């Protein structure tokens, strides 16, 4: 399996410039305090309609997002057998594949447009399998499959007009990863560093926290935030809200109440961070409109309110990493 090989330092510097709106003054806000960073991400990045909605939200709010892409959405039933996940037969995926060549073509255009607009494309692996028990070699195979499918998606599916910079983008700009189900396992982090990734965003913290360095990676953790009438902590992700609110079953008649709760949880977490030490606030979403789109609408309201504030920067993970710290060089796992 082909593994990533990246000119890391130059790639990260380029990403910081390309992905960040208004990089000047990013280290200190107007009042002299550090800015409040908000890192909003989407896992899977499948349905075309949600690509369009999210990009429209970014244009309206000034935000930039991280899209953790699942590579099986770049394969059709005719090309699905090109992917074989660890311990799986070829052509199997927990999240399916694209339905047609035309769908893949439109998704590729969305990815390229988002990248040109300053968003970050990162990896969510391919088949959305639980890799907690995988070996380092199995993780390396999954990461290699992602890179191969992304780099060759146009030719694999016989889609014309591949952008001139696509291969360079696929080879050099995918620096972040989030594990499906947030299932990491002991072998993942070494495999990521060996493959040239700069950060992982699969762990969980008790509250908003600065990323930490270790094993040749920066680790970003989704925070637990208070939610609901009893303010019980919950991972700041739409699916976790969906499970708590409705047991992961659709209840569209209660969507307004769920939306209000989700918005309050996001806004309270933001206000506490903004008034305090200003650790980056990470919020995770999917392209699935759960409970009638309640969590999507809560995000639209939240981003519309906070991302335009003078002391707030809504950016992708790679942009935050490039703006606020150098990449870790504490071991030899980061060789090109």
Image (cartoon, grey):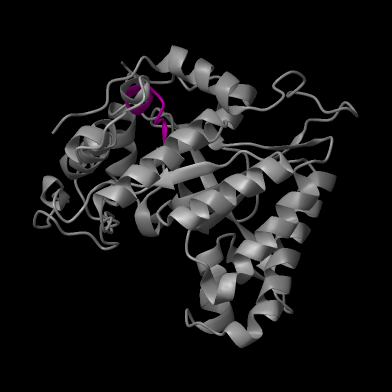
Residues in magenta? 169-176
Where residue 124 appears, as percent x and y from the top left, is: 37, 47
Q: Is residue 116 left or right of residue 22?
A: left
Outermost residue to the right: 31
Q: Is residue 117 left or right of residue 36?
A: left
Given residues 210 and 249, the one toward you in this image is 249
**Residue under the image location 13 percent in, 50 percent down:** 84
Given residues 200 and 290, the one toward you in this image is 290
Where residue 273 appears, as percent x and y from the top left, is: 76, 48
Given residues 84 and 220, the one toward you in this image is 84
When the figure is inspected, residue 216 is found, relative to residue 226, above or below; the finding is above
Total marks placed? 0
The image quadrant where one finds the C terminus is top left
Residue 175 magenta: yes
**Residue under the image location 71 percent in, 51 percent down:** 303
The image quadrant where one finds the N terminus is top left
**Residue under the image location 62 percent in, 47 percent down:** 56
Where residue 235 appears, as percent x and y from the top left, is: 56, 62
Q: Is residue 86 left or right of residue 70?
A: left
Quarter assignment of residue 21 = top right
Quarter assignment of residue 244 = bottom right
Where residue 259 appears, as percent x and y from the top left, is: 68, 72
């Amino acid at each position: 399996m082909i593994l990533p090989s990246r000119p890391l330092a130059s790639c990260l510097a380029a990403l910081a410039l390309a992905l960040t709106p208004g990089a000047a003054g990013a280290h200190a806000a107007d009042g002299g305090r550090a800015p409040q960073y908000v890192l909003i991400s989407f896992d899977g990045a499948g349905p075309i309609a949600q690509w369009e909605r999210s990009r429209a939200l970014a244009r309206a709010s000034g935000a930039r997002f991280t899209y953790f892409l699942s590579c099986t959405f770049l394969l059709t039933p005719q090309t699905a057998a090109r992917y074989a996940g660890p311990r799986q037969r070829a052509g199997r995926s927990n999240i399916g594949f694209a339905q047609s060549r035309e769908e893949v073509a439109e998704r590729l255009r969305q990815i390229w447009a988002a990248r040109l607009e300053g968003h970050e494309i990162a990896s969510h692996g391919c088949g959305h399998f639980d890799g907690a028990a995988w070996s380092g070699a199995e993780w390396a195979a999954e990461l290699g499959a992602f890179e191969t499918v992304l780099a060759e998606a146009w030719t694999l599916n016989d889609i014309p007009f591949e952008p001139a910079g696509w291969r360079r983008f696929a080879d050099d700009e995918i620096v972040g990863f989030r594990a499906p189900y947030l299932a990491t396992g002991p072998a993942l982090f070494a495999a990521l560093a060996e493959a040239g990734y700069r950060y992982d965003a699969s762990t969980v913290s008790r509250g908003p926290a600065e990323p930490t360095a270790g094993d040749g990676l920066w680790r970003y953790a989704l925070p637990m935030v208070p939610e609901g009438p009893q303010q019980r902590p919950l991972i700041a992700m739409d699916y976790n809200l969906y499970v708590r609110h409705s047991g992961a079953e659709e209840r569209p008649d209660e969507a307004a109440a769920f939306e209000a709760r989700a918005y309050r949880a996001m806004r309270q977490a933001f206000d506490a961070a903004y008034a305090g030490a200003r650790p980056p606030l990470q919020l995770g979403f999917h392209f699935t409109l759960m409970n009638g789109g309640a969590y999507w609408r809560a995000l639209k309201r939240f981003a519309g309110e906070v991302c335009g504030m003078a002391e707030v920067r809504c950016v992708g993970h790679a942009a935050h990493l490039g703006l606020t710290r150098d990449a870790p060089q504490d071991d030899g796992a980061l060789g090109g």
